[in-house]
Image (tube, helix red, strand yellow):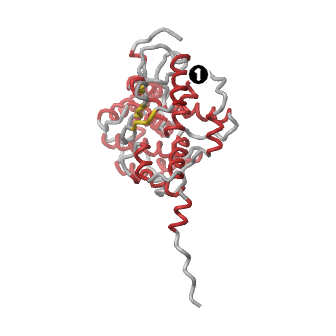
Amino acid sequence: MGKPITRKQVWSPESARRYTRRRIARARSGNRPTLWSFARWLEESRGLSAATVTVRIGCASTFVDAMTLCTDMSCTRALRLITADAVEDFFVEYGKDHGMPARRSMQAAMRLFLEFAALRGWLSRELVGAVPSLASYRLSSLPTAISDKELSRILTLRWEGGLCPLRDRAIVWLLAIYGARRGQISALCLNDIDWRERIIELHGHKGGKAVRHRLTESVAEVLAEYLSKERPRVACDEVFLRCRRPYMRLAPGAISTMVQARMKQSGLPPVHAHAFRHAFATRLLRTGQPIKAIADLLGHRSLAAVAIYAKLDHPRLLEAAADWPEVAP
């Protein structure tokens, strides 16, 4: 099981900063001081979390390296020569090989970096507007959910292989039974589970509220098996930990990777962990639960956040649909 570790090794804002340092170390040497200043500005002036800074730095490093690739100038001098066309061309080329989430992340990082550079007088603030916009239409898509048949298959799968099959099984059960976010699973602590009262509390996420669920017999069983047989015995509050040292809490991204691998193992199309949340909401809708109750169980403060699920309630939509008016002869 491994020896106990100190709290310094547990997942924390400092561990996220270590990832930031490693990403900056991979950037071109002449760009590193500028990226360091940008990282400090994001955290100290913009108030971003250490984890978000890591994401923004990853994209900004790619952008800055591309903008200074064919020059021997210092980073700050090279930035003075950037044109609006160069900014737009980079983003268009990046978008050809990346999906919408990656494009949005790069867009945010580029705009923040250009704003940061403009505040220091390295380039014109007008360049911030040169980053192309991405078309977005609210409620234009349908949530991608797992069917009941697929859900039954993955929950009854024999959890074999991999380094932590009991951990992986427990995570998928929490995603499926409670519609939890991967971030809530990552942040779940031992004291969030009240075994005596059979209650499990999921922390609020993205401005939402904490949600308390009844700890079902099946979920309690898979959790107890993981905790007693597989979880490393270390001084860490989080429930789900990495299988190898350092035994930090399992990051949200690692949960998505695991889910996709387990779906593939069960012969199903690989999906994002959020698909279980969509399936949870869809099941509630089919049982006649009102939108307000679904919002509460998902931890949303606003009904608008779950309005998209109304598009999946086909019977009610048919009831609301008006007959097509006949054309008068």
Residue on which disc 1 sits: 164
- Residue 309 x, y percent position in the rendering: 50, 53
Residue placed at 56% from the left, 40% from the top?
272
- The reply to whether residue 254 is in sight is no
- Observer-nearest of 287 and 107: 287
In the depicted structure, whether residue 3 falls above or below residue 42: above
- Observer-nearest of 255 and 95: 255
The local crowd at label 1, few if under 14, some if 14 to 19, many if 20 or more residues have their Cα within 10 Å, is some
Residue placed at 48% from the left, 28% from the top?
251
Find the residue positioned furthest to the bottom.
Answer: 329
> Where's the C terminus, which quadrant?
bottom right
- Residue 82 x, y percent position in the rendering: 43, 45
In the depicted structure, whether residue 94 falls above or below residue 316: above
**Figure quadrant of residue 214:** top left
- Mark 1 belongs to which amino acid? Cys
Find the residue positioned furthest to the top.
Answer: 3
- Observer-nearest of 88 and 315: 315
- The reply to whether residue 63 is in sight is yes
**Figure quadrant of residue 21:** top left
Q: Secondary structure at mark 1?
A: loop
In the depicted structure, whether residue 41 falls above or below residue 106: above
- Residue 117 x, y percent position in the rendering: 35, 40
- Observer-nearest of 177 and 35: 177
